[in-house]
Image (tube, rainbow, N blue to C red):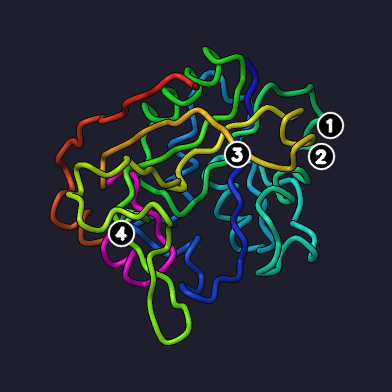
Amino acid sequence: MRILALIPARGGSKRLPGKNIKLLGGKPLITWSIEAASGILEICDILVSTDSTEISSIASDAGASVPWLRPEYLSSDEALSVDVALHALDWYESKNESVEGLLLLQPTSPFRTKASISEGIQLYAENDCFPVIGVSPADSSPFWMFKNEGEYIVPLLPNHGFGKRKQDLQEVLTPNGSFYLVHPSYLRKHHSFGEDKAIPLLNTNKRETIDIDTTWDFELANLILKNYPLLPHPHEIKTRPVD
């Protein structure tokens, strides 16, 4: 199986300026994802899509392929990940053999492991290349959430769970940002990574699924490395078949 790993790394970031090359544990944030994807047999190439010459240089030094700088129309705050992925996929397949999967690895998930990536690829292969998305148990249940309605707050969902114990509520999962694997034909047809229906790559390891988007997230990641630099973290992946 030939899978193209794509790491999107835009130069601009309003919430955490320069986040993709901020040093975490002595190396740029993007390098963590490049190293995690390296050496996995099914991954035929690691392509970085960026609009920054600095990120391009760092990613190339880390072993990724950066054949061009992302066009301006895909480098704004409004640009969608799916459009960035299609741009990279179309270019890659026009220059190389076709691939059987596009694996999106966001650089903001530095602690994902090779084991998790391999587990997701295995799920993908075993389920006839159906989309696979990395998810974790939601910290807050939507069944306990409110929304504003005039001067009042009302339950977000009609079948809310107020008055019930948390363990009695329906289990809710949320994308952790660490893994999106989709077949090129599905991506092109549906313009989606499979958000309507996908195989869950369920990960309960809080360290592995940290998603760095703010200064707080980055400080938390550094704190984890400082206090637990050598401790192995158990692989806590669980999988479920598609309905």
Residue at image mark 3: 196
Q: Tell me the number on the disc at residue 95.
A: 1
Residue at 28% x, 67% y: name it: 219
Q: Is mark 4 on a helix, strand or loop?
A: helix
Callout 3: SS: loop
| Amino acid beneath label 2 | Trp
> Which amino acid type is shown beneath numbered disc 3?
Asp
Q: How far apart are marks 2 and 3 (CA)?
A: 26 Å
Residues tagged 4 and 3 counted as in contact (Cβ below 8 A) = no
Q: Is mark 2 on a helix, strand or loop?
A: helix
Residue 213 painted magenta: yes
Left or right: residue 190 compared with residue 116: right
Instruction: Name the one closer to the observer, 27 or 193.
Output: 193
- Residue type at tag 4: Trp
Ranked by sequence position, the earlier of labels 3 and 1 is 1
Which mark's residue is nearer the viewer, 4 or 1? 4
Residue count near mark 2 (Cα–Cα under 10 Å), binned few <14, some 14–19, many ≥20: few
Residue at image coords 69%, 67%: 78
Q: In the picture shown, does residue 188 fall above or below 160?
A: above
Residue 151: which quarter of the image?
bottom left
Give the amino acid at mark 1. Lys
Magenta residue span: 207-220
Tag 4 residue: 144
Q: Which of the two discs, 4 and 3, sits closer to the camera?
A: 4
Residue topped by disc 2: 91
User: Residue 220, percent across and down?
Assistant: 26, 63
Q: Position of residue 93 (x, y in %)?
A: 80, 30
Circle nearer the N terminus (4, 1): 1
Where does the image place residue 33, in percent across and percent down from the top left? 46, 44
